[in-house]
Structure formats: structure tokens, C-alpha cells
Image (cartoon, rainbow, N blue to C red):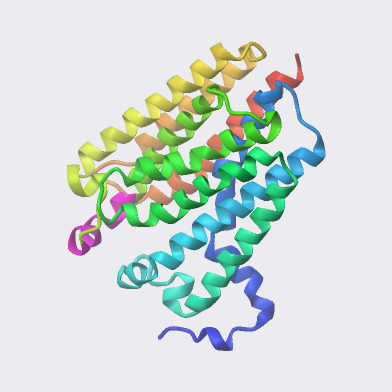
Amino acid sequence: MAADASTTSPMKLPALFAKFVKIEHSVFALPFAYAGAFLALQQIPSFTKMFWITVVMVAARSLAMGLNRVIDHEIDARNPRTAGREIPAGALSLSQGIAFCGVSLAVLAVGLYQLPRLTWYLSPIVVVAFVIYPYTKRFTSLCHLFLGATIGLAPVGAWVAITCSLAWKPFLLMGIVTFWIAGFDIIYACRDLDFDRREGIHSLPVSLGVRRALWVTRVFHLLAVALMVVVGMVFSKLGGIYFLGVAVVATLLAYENAIVSTRDLSRVNTAFMTMNGVISIVYIAFLTTDIVVK
């Protein structure tokens, strides 16, 4: 039986909202946003600048996830795996979910106001992408790439926040995030194969089958590693420490792909949350170390 959102104690709302948007998943994109900021200067920016970049990135991600949960709440309610999410389960009402998105948008606007004006002008592109993504699974199997590219805007935005200009270099980081996230989103989608087929939801596992879709994941992750190598070659500040980090990331990605197969999808959660959280932290740790020690 679903809970009644009207009886939820206000004291419990912060924890519910944090769970609603899985705030811990900010670890996926935030380190790459920092990478964009660090590489823009090829040194660590000021605390104030990094503080507002963090506020903007967390608010943007919260808005994106909130919109996804609101737009998909009816689909989530029909899927046994997601029926326990806050809106379908009744822990939060649809209006509360919409209100949370409004607050996230307001915080995003405040944060952008503290950054260069160009970030404000470009922000509608990002917000529109947040709105479009939840609908992509309704008409294209390339929804995984759209998700990756949307999250991949984080390092580009951070670059603009530091330099007040657009350039081609941060799009290399965007490419890394796009292929990395699209790859593990394919793995994640394997869990919903039967439901997606029944409901007409599009994904690569549905259109290609699990075995072929997992091979696409491997190709995407190989491309992500290749772009990491290109980043190391393009930015003169990066050297041996950075490339050691790329090697570690490549090893972790290989392990992530090895523990998921057509015969065993039981460790998808390990591949999705644990491994990807470690990968993003490892990447930024080695990149930052290489910049700081030079």
C-alpha cells in the first residue's frame, strides 16, 4: 500500500528529497566539472569560484533528476523495480516533486548569477536538455547517448565559468563523460529489458539484445579511455601522473564490464554505483595531482 505524502513529517522531507534525486550520484559528473575548471586554468581556481561551480552543478543535477522523476512517475509506477520510488510510492506527491524542481531551478539561477554572464546565456540549452532527456526513451534507442551528452555539458559549463568563453578543448571532456555514462546506462537498462519491451520503452538492450548492447558499452568505454588519452596529449600540464590515472580508470572500466554478462546481471548495481563513483574520483584525483605537482 502506497504511503500518503500529506502525512509526511516536514522534518523528513530533506532526507526524502535527497533520496528522490539520489544526491550521492552527483559524484558521477561533479569531478568532471572540476576537471573542466582545473584544465581551463591548468591550476586550481579560487575557492569562491569553485564554490559557486559546485552549487550550480549540484543544483543542475538535482533539477535534471527531479524532472526525470516527475516526467516518468507514471512509468515508474508500472515498473516493479521503480514502483518504490518516492512519487509512485506516495512518500512525495507529484506537486512536491514539481516544487523541488522549482527550488532547484531557483538555486541554479542564483549560482549562475555569481558566475560570468555567458554561463547565464547558455543555461537555457542545458535546462531544455534536462526536459527532453526523459522523453527520449519513448522514441529512440539512442537515449543513452543523449543522457551522456546532457551530463557531459558539466565540464563545458565549468570551463565557461572559468574562462568566460567557449573553446573546443572542454568538448573532449564532454566526449569522455558522454561515452562513459552512455555505456553504464546501457548496463543499467539491461535490468528493465522485459518491462521496456512490454511498455514500448526504447533502449539498446531492447533493440539489440543484451549481448550486443553490452558490446556497445565496451566500445563506448574504450572511446572514453581514448579521449582521456587525447586530453593528456592536448594539455601540456598533464604528464605521467595523469596517464597513470587513465590506466587505473581503464582497468576499473574493464572490471566493470567483466562483472556484467548476459548470464549474470546480478552485479549491475555494483557496476553502476560503486565502480562509477570510484572511476570519477580516481580520474579527478590523478588529474589534480598532476596539475598541482608541476
In the picture provided, is 77 more to the left or to the right than 113? left
The quadrant in which residue 85 appears is bottom left
In the picture provided, is 275 more to the left or to the right than 206? right
Q: Is residue 110 above or below residue 208?
A: below
Q: Position of residue 141 (x, y in %)?
A: 26, 46
Q: Which residue is depicted at the point 54% across and 43% down?
A: 28
Q: Which residue is depicted at the point 51% across and 52% down?
A: 127
Residue 263 visible somewhere in the drawing: no
Q: Position of residue 255 (x, y in %)?
A: 42, 33
Question: Foreground: 100 or 128?
Answer: 128
Residue 253 visible somewhere in the drawing: yes
Main secondary structure type of the part rendered in magenta: helix
Q: Quadrant of the C terminus?
A: top right
Q: Is residue 114 above or below residue 168?
A: below
Q: Is residue 41 above or below residue 186?
A: above
Question: Foreground: 127 or 189?
Answer: 127
Q: Position of residue 59 (x, y in %)?
A: 62, 54
Q: Quadrant of the N terminus?
A: bottom left
Question: Foreground: 187 or 180?
Answer: 180
Q: Which residues are magenta?
A: 189-199
Q: Quick check: is 11 in the magenta stretch?
A: no
